[in-house]
Amino acid sequence: MSLRPPQNLTSHFGGSAPSALDYEIMGEMAASLGRAGEKVEQTLAQLAAAAMPERDMRLRAAARAVHAYFIQRELCGLRNHDAAIVDYNIPRAVLIRLGAS
């Protein structure tokens, strides 16, 4: 019995099986995306708990974290952010800071 890699991996790597380095790179990309997502969760929680004097500072921090997360998603090939916006419950005020509406 022979084993073959999943079709979605072979097409991504030019028709050949991914090497050990490719697997390592994919793992690092996933870990980096996870860290960026954790940062988004932390900054959004701080924003929700912020009182009025520090709300603007927390809003800027949340917008920076979400922007970095969106960039990391795009580097991983994930171009549509709609699901992430819903999953993280990103407030409209943060999205407006990013230029999205």
Image (spheres, rainbow, N blue to C red):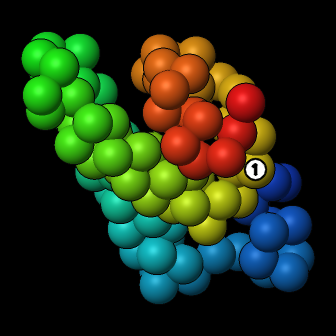
- Front one among 11 and 29: 29
- Front one among 42 and 2: 42
The percent position of residue 91, horizontal first and vertical second, equals 48, 20
Would residue 6 be seen by someone viewing this image from the given angle? no
Would residue 23 be seen by someone viewing this image from the given angle? yes
The percent position of residue 8, horizontal first and vertical second, equals 80, 54
Quadrant showing the C terminus: top right
The 10 Å Cα crowd at callout 1, few under 14, some 14 to 19, many 20 or more, is few
Q: In this rendering, is residue 72 above or below 1?
A: below
Q: For this view, does 10 lie left or right of residue 56?
A: right
Q: In this rendering, is residue 21 above or below 77?
A: below
The residue under label 1 is 79
Mark 1 belongs to which amino acid?
Arg
Q: In this rendering, is residue 83 above or below 54?
A: above
The furthest residue to the front: 53
Tell me the quarter of the picture where residue 42 sits.
Answer: top left
Identify which residue is drawn at 54% across, 78% down. Answer: 22
The count of marks equals: 1
- What element does badge 1 sit on? loop
- Front one among 35 and 52: 52
The percent position of residue 37, horizontal first and vertical second, equals 36, 41
Identify which residue is drawn at 44% across, 58% down. Answer: 68
Identify which residue is drawn at 12% across, 17% down. Answer: 51
Identify which residue is drawn at 87% across, 66% down. Answer: 11
